[in-house]
Image (tube, grey):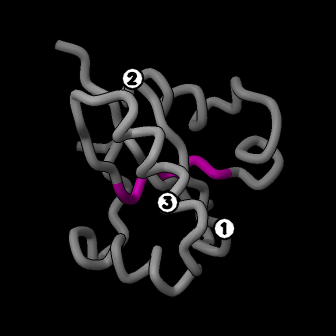
Amino acid sequence: MNQYYVYMNTNPTYTVLYVGMTNNLEHRTSQHRNHILKGFTKKYNVTRLVYFEATEDVQAAIAREKQLKRWTRARKIALIESVNPEWRDLSDS
């Protein structure tokens, strides 16, 4: 069964939040960290993985990504801090 991940990344100064979805979190995190993907994440140096959740249902992952993208910054921060209060880079572990 495939795993799908909805994740949030931030930049080193925590001023930007990015919500994404992937079926390979380790590879996608590496792409962000090494600035392989052009666009928003490269422009704003969004390299730190601070939140993720997994599901086996691709449609659920897509729906959750869309839901989180509509959330306010404060609500996203509350979600991150509920599981990662120190804002550790989860890709380091």
Q: Position of residue 7 (x, y in %)?
A: 42, 48
Q: Which residue is mark 3?
A: 67
- Say whether disc 2 or disc 3 marks the residue closer to the N-terminus: 2
Q: How many marks?
A: 3
Q: Is residue 90 magenta?
A: no
Q: CA distance from mark 3 to mark 1?
A: 18 Å
Amino acid type, label 1: Val
In magenta, the rendered stretch is: 46-51
Left or right, residue 11 beside residue 82: right
Amino acid type, label 3: Gln
Q: Which residue is mark 1?
A: 16
Q: Residue at x 44, y 21 (%)?
A: 27
Please give the label number shown on residue 23: 2
* Secondary structure state at the residue bearing disc 1: loop
Q: Does the residue at mark 2 contact the one at mark 3 (Cβ under 8 Å)?
A: no
* Secondary structure state at the residue bearing disc 3: helix
* Secondary structure state at the residue bearing disc 2: loop
Q: Main secondary structure of the magenta part?
A: strand
Left or right, residue 5 beside residue 62: left
Left or right, residue 66 beside residue 87: right
- Say whether disc 2 or disc 1 marks the residue closer to the N-terminus: 1
Q: Is residue 47 magenta?
A: yes
Q: CA distance from mark 2 to mark 3?
A: 18 Å
